[in-house]
Image (spheres, rainbow, N blue to C red):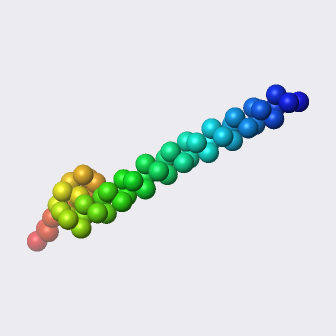
Amino acid sequence: MKIWGFVLFLLVAGMAFWLLTFVALFVGYWISINGLSKISPKLAHKIAGVKEEEDSK
């Protein structure tokens, strides 16, 4: 029975580790792109992959 508690602990700890890793990387990317868009909007759009809309007249 102790082994199942340990396995459950490993599963929960592993999920928490990967979730925190993802959140930390995502927030870092978000802050970087946000700050860069204030300084150089064209560069930030290029890095983020935003495509400019073309006017079709």
Indicate the quadrant containing the N terminus: top left, top right, bottom left or bottom right. Answer: top right
Q: Residue lying farthest right?
A: 1
Residue at position x 63%, y 38% in the image: 14
Above-or-below relation of 37 to 28 = below
Quick check: 44 left or right of 16? left
**Dividing the picture into quarters, in which one does residue 32 lie?**
bottom left
The one of 54 and 40 positioned closer to us in this rendering: 40
Q: Say left or right for 55 vs 14.
A: left
Residue 34 picture location, percent across and down: 31, 63
Specify the farthest residue to the left. Answer: 57
How many marks are shown on the rendered structure?
Answer: 0
At 75% from the left and 37% from the top, the residue drawn is 8
Quadrant placement of the C terminus = bottom left
Horizontal side of residue 27 vs 14, given as left or right: left
Percent across and percent down for residue 39 are 20, 65
Does 28 sit above or below residue 21?
below
Name, please, the residue furthest toward the bottom. 57
Q: Hey, which quadrant is residue 12 in on the image?
A: top right
**Residue drawn where x is 36% and y is 53% of the image:** 29
As drawn, which residue projects farthest toward the top? 3
